[in-house]
Amino acid sequence: MNKVLQRAEDAVALVPDGATIMIGGFGLCGIPENLIDALRIRGTKDLTIISNNAGVDDFGIGRLLRARQLKKMIASYVGENKEFERQVITGEIDVELIPQGTLAERIRAGGAGIGGFFTPTGFGTVVAEGKETRVIDGKSFVFEQPLRADFAFVKAWRGDRKGNLIYRRTARNFNPVMATAAKVTIAEVEELVEPGRLDPDAIVTPGIFVRHILQGPSYEKRIEKRTVRL
């Protein structure tokens, strides 16, 4: 099976309207920039996006929000995006906010085939409304279900033509768990090499999880919030 796609446009052509997509990244670190932009240009709509955050107003997932392509956002942190805030207040988009650790574990559970788990996080808050609770060893827990998606867009540092991926430092973040939790995982990498070029001990995501891979032509790698001191 040839997993290599030449362009991000070829990858997003596989995504229908109404799809659920996991998008890797933390802030603007380790996001699949080219796949996001190609999805925006294609105009695919009514999307449910699962991601740690919603980008910023003019970059990352924020561009999809501005183009009104999202119907729902499942995320942990959305505080850097004024357009997202506006759409939530006006009822233009549905949102499900999940504690960050719970979000990561729900995605991991989805990829591992686990039917759910109990966590103390969120007990006694709106997060627990409508969910099963249980006392274990004298402590209260909330039952959380796994998260899965139709597609996962992930970003890696290096990859080979078989889909094996290596991430670079904190740009790893949510990418590896998302790569396991979707029906179709599409990876974009900064450097695409031939099989055998990657150190097997350094591979984080085995190629069995990756359906398609492409090399991004360029990356802005923006900083989400720049703080300077005189």
Image (cartoon, helix red, strand yellow):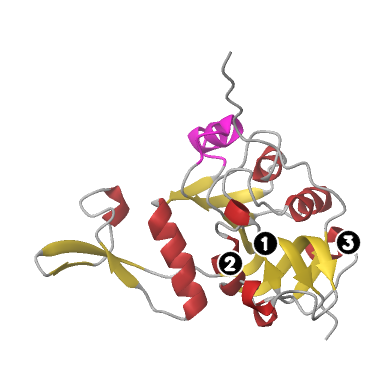
Residue 7's tag is 3
Q: Which quadrant would residue 21 be assigned to in this image?
A: bottom right
> What's the amino acid at mark 1?
Val
Residue 13 visible in the current orientation:
no
Label 3's element? loop
Identify residue for label 2.
Answer: 176
Q: How far apart are the alpha carbons under marks 3 and 1?
A: 15 Å
Above or below, 200 relative to 150: below
Left or right placement of residue 115 versus residue 10 in this view: left
User: Residue 190, percent across and down?
Assistant: 79, 57
Callout 2 crowding tier (Cα within 10 Å): few <14, some 14–19, many ≥20: many
Compute the Cα span from label 3 to label 2. Answer: 22 Å
Name the residue at 52% across, 51% down. Answer: 52
Q: Nearer the viewer, residue 181 or 217?
A: 217
Mark 1 — residue?
154
Residue range in magenta is 78-92
